[in-house]
Image: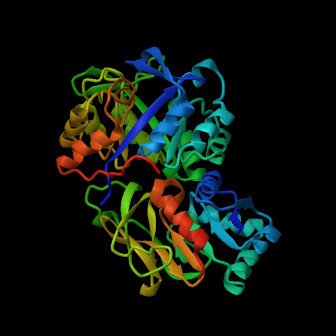
């Protein structure tokens, strides 16, 4: 039986790990290479690692630096940030990324996901959907400038284009640590048939339990809980396992 | 011991080399026929579309080199993910012929048997050995490996099935015959179970 995935989603600014609140107020939280080493020794299921300032600063992701991070990871790694061409995807896959996370280009170039999926396989093309609540049961696809697009519609569209996975982040819950937006997760799960990683708001193992009880999602991402609390991915899985969910247990260390 | 990771333009080669190093082995990534011919062991990696994989192998001119190493000199080879699928005779993905080392077909997960399960099958799953084999010494203890795929192999010879996993239904996730083995999952991405598998591949004397 397929195990539930708990995935640290780490954001960095080109140099250091930063953690945002509702996508603002970035706060320095550590060194990416050290963090990768720690998460590897804790046997986490996967890692997502995104340069959140590359696109807006108009620069490419720092490949030698990211390679150092990937070399610490003996589990699947998704890398995002500053992807502007198929060549950028190829560069990331070449240094050992298993999946790439595309956001802005998925919005601005409607063909990009389809091209990427055709060339590299759908399984390695993840699309980041950042959703901000605009009313009851509606969410806008969020980026620095308003998109006017419906986040759930957009999810449906990227699936049709060939995305292999959606990393779905609630902007309102980001960094707040008071629970996931389960309505958002359910709305997207109803719309698509590809795996979804629910991100935003996980601040305690109970929040993860609530997410998996209220939705049919099979993967959850988080970061603040790992930076600012004593809980590890093991604690989250222990909680889930105690309530009958299939989680993958592994003692720390390898 | 030198392992050659065959570079035909697809796949996460750096991660495989990284895991071999961690498991105590030496490897080289190469598309050079003389390096491939001289290697003591081979790994056929690969991620992506089956038709693109076969096309790359044909275009690179490696087909006769691979056939000679694997079928005539019996060099031990491990196929990973698409690399394993390419060892089959045919794939639904693109409707093309594969290397034909296993009498088997690559088929898409049958959505009608999947309920509300998502395809691709992505994540950690238990792998159950189907027969005693040096690569799976613990027949009674399922190990967990990382999967990401939408297609899987279906063997026509039951004795080729090395291990199975369950996703919607039981499917074959590893195959072996003589000096040839293949795995749908990614040992290079599977922490200590993956490292154990890589150590056994390094030791393997078929």
Above or below, comparing residue B102 to residue A17 in the picture: below
Q: Residue at x 72, y 67 (%)?
A: B2
Whole-percent x, y for residue A143 in the image: 46, 22
User: As drawn, is A32 to the left or to the right of B145?
Assistant: right
Residue A110 visible here = no
Q: Is residue A7 left or right of residue A207?
A: right
Residue sticking out furthest to the top: A25
* Residue A101 x, y percent position in the rendering: 51, 38
Most distant residue in the right direction: B34
Find residue A100 and report its horizontal and vertical position in percent: 54, 41
The one nearer the camera, A195 or A92, is A92
Quadrant housing residue B41: bottom right
Which residue appears at 78% of the width and 73% of the height? B38
Question: Where does the N terminus of chain A fall, quadrant-wise?
Answer: bottom left
Residue B144 visible in this rendered orientation of the protein: yes
Q: Is residue A132 above or below residue B196?
A: above
Question: For the image shown, how many numbered marks are present on the structure?
Answer: 0
User: Residue at 25% across / 37% down in the picture?
Assistant: A208
Could you tell me residue B87's position as x and y percent?
58, 75
Position of A128 relative to B20 (above/below) = above
Q: How is the image coloured?
A: rainbow
Res A173 quadrant in image: top left
Instruction: From the viewer's side, name the closer residue of A68 and A253.
Output: A253
Q: Quadrant of residue B147?
A: bottom left
Q: Residue at x 54, y 57 (%)?
A: B188
């Amino acid at each position: 039986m397929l195990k539930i995935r708990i995935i640290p989603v780490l954001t960095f600014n080109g140099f250091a790990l930063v953690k945002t609140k509702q996508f603002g107020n970035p706060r320095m939280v550590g060194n990416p290479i050290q963090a990768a080493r720690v998460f590897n020794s804790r046997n986490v299921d996967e890692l997502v690692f995104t340069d959140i300032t590359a696109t807006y600063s108009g620069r490419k992701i720092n490949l030698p630096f990211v390679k150092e991070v990937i070399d610490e990871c003996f589990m699947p790694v998704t890398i995002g940030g500053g992807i502007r061409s198929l060549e950028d995807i190829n560069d990331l896959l070449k240094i050992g990324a298993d999946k790439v996370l595309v956001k802005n280009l998925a919005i601005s170039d409607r063909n990009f996901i389809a091209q990427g999926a055709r060339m590299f396989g759908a399984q390695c093309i993840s699309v980041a959907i950042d959703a901000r609540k605009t009313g009851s049961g509606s969410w806008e696809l969020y980026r620095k400038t308003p998109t006017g697009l419906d986040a759930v519609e957009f999810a449906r569209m990227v699936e049709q284009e060939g995305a292999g996975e959606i990393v779905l982040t609630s902007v309102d819950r980001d960094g707040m640590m008071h629970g996931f937006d389960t309505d958002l997760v359910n709305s997207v799960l109803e719309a698509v048939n590809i795996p979804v990683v629910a991100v935003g708001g996980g601040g305690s193992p109970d929040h993860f339990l609530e997410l998996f009880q209220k939705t049919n999602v099979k993967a959850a991402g988080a970061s603040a809980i790992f930076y600012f609390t004593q809980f590890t991915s093991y604690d989250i899985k222990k909680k889930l396992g105690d309530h009958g969910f299939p989680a993958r247990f592994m003692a720390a260390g390898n | 011991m030198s392992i050659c990771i065959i570079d035909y333009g697809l796949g996460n080669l750096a991660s495989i080399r990284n895991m071999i190093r961690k498991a105590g082995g030496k490897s080289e990534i190469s598309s050079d026929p003389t390096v491939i011919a001289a290697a003591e062991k081979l790994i056929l990696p690969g991620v992506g579309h089956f038709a693109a994989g076969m096309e790359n192998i044909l275009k690179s001119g490696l087909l006769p080199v691979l056939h000679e190493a694997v079928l005539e000199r019996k060099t031990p080879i491990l196929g990973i993910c698409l690399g394993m699928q390419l060892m089959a005779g045919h794939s639904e993905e693109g409707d093309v012929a594969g290397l034909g080392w296993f009498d088997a077909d690559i088929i898409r997960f049958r959505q009608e048997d999947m309920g509300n399960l998502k395809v691709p099958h992505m994540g950690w799953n238990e792998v159950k050995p189907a027969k005693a084999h040096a690569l799976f010494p613990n027949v009674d203890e399922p190990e967990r490996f990382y999967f990401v795929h939408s297609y899987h192999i279906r063997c026509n010879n039951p004795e080729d099935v090395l291990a199975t996993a369950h996703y919607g239904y039981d499917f074959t996730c590893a195959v072996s015959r003589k000096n040839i083995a293949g795995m749908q999952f990614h040992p290079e991405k599977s922490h200590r179970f993956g490292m154990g598998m890589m150590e056994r591949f390094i030791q393997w004397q078929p």
